[in-house]
Image: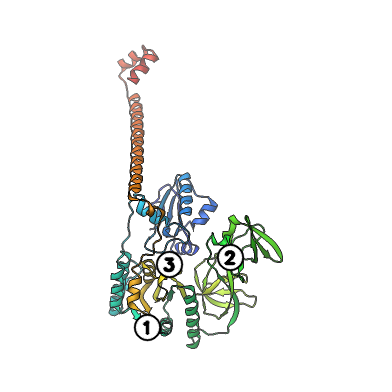
Amino acid sequence: MPINRKTTPNKSASVLAPQRQQVIDLARDGLAQTQTVRECLQRRDLAERAVVIVDEAGQIDGRQLLDLIRFIRDRNGRLILCGDTRQHGPVEASDALRAIEHYSGLRAAELNQIRRQEPKRGRTVAEWKQIRDYREAVKAAAAGETRCSFEKLEKLGAVVECGLGEQSTRLCDSYLDIAALGESAVVVSQTRAEVREINDAIREGLRERGLLTGDETEVTALEQVDLTSAQKLDARHYPADCVLVFNRDLSGCVRGERGKLIGITAKRLALELNGKVRHVPLSHLDHINVCRERALALSPGDRLQLKANSASAEGRKLANGEVVSVAQIKSNGAIRLADGRVLPPHYRQFLRGYAVTSYGSQGKTVDHVLFSDSAIRAATNAQQWYVTISRGRKSIQIFTPDKDELRHAIMRSGERELALDLLSARARRYGVRQRMLRSVRRGREFARHIAHVAMRSWTAAFIKLRLKPTDEIRNKQTNRVARAGVLAA
């Protein structure tokens, strides 16, 4: 919905999202005043009585959402949360939006129309029917009917059972056929190891078919090691060959600089940076990324997935999760992208971008989705299924070693248990009663306030009435005390 003065009269509106890539997509769609939730909390420049709309709110953890609610409340603003709790939740603890949905007692407005899979995109009657049936499968997954969704895709011929050792080959061939048609595609896999393997296989196939030409240049990329805030406090979780990269400026350290871990004390992390020892307070560990070096051969036309927020050489934004195409590798190490931006020589936090994880695919839209089902069943669940199959405009192809096992695995919920889920039904009923009592008290206070305002308005109107001339003479002969008593009566 466009945000303008008609929808928010006399109020400023701000649109937030958890990730930088989501913010860029929103700005590209024409929304102004977009920023990440973290930026909003850091800058604290929200206007008084502003309307704040948060997209993909299901990816915000409990602590961050609580900080945002308190901040907007202090500004007397209004908060609107938009998200889908059937998709992937936050990496950090607490699925805040799901807790609100289940336990707050608030009624949510729902949008049920699917726009991504539009049958009108089909060039033939067969394509039109295929996209229509594809949309029905996505609709079933969105409604929580996972088994029905699987059966619809199986009937469509989208679920392909592969023999031992042929899954990767068939998936790569399908990707190369789509690339030859000039349409967009993404491969979704479930583990980083599989993503790396598929990326390398697809790139090799592109070179063999002549779809990726030009001289190769080897660069040293930095592959991020995903550590939680708690894991960053323990040196045992840091790989021996890891590189620490600053993602923000901090105490004389510039964003993009790299260092080596020395050790972690009770209050600080020590690292070697440009031959000097630097200390990072443990409260600022989110300012560094833990990475590993990996050699990558690049050619013009290669696809990369950026893995850190930064700025290009000319000052344009680079977003974590963004998939870009290489146009040129310069002699100084800078990489010019197809959209004109230039990755500076120190920016090396990227991977090949032909295949991504299910979490990395959330929010992306392509013509065709190719899903590589993993033998690791712990990575397969209803959330992963819904996110993966809903990324395409035209089609989805699923390559699996066992249809029956996949059908069984996607029935498992990927939702994490909330602390509120552990409360007994009696305790939850007590909490509901307390919320109802608070609502009644607020209602009474509101009614008293309305009655007080109405009485004041009636008194003012009474005083302004035109009195008759005889009454005016009579009033002049009375004193102020008597008149005050009459008005009070």
Is the residue marked by circle 1 packed among few (<14), some (14-19), or many (20+) residues within 10 Å? some
Residues tagged 1 and 3 counted as in contact (Cβ below 8 A)? no
Q: Name the N-terminal-most of marks 1 and 2.
A: 1
For residue 162, which numbered disc appears in the image? 1
Q: Give me the C-alpha separation between circle 1 and circle 2.
A: 40 Å
Query: Is residue 436 shown left or right of residue 4?
Result: left
Label 2: which secondary element? helix
Residues tagged 1 and 2 counted as in contact (Cβ below 8 A)? no
Of the residues tagged 1 and 2, which is closer to the observer? 2
Residue at the spot of label 3: 362
**Horizontal and vertical percent position of residue 302:** 52, 79
Residue at the spot of label 2: 236
**Horizontal and vertical percent position of residue 67:** 48, 50
The three-letter amino acid code for the residue at tag 2 is Arg
Is the residue marked by circle 3 packed among few (<14), some (14-19), or many (20+) residues within 10 Å? many
Towards the viewer: 244 or 300? 244
Towards the viewer: 139 or 166? 166
**Horizontal and vertical percent position of residue 71:** 48, 48
Q: Give me the C-alpha separation between circle 2 and circle 3.
A: 31 Å
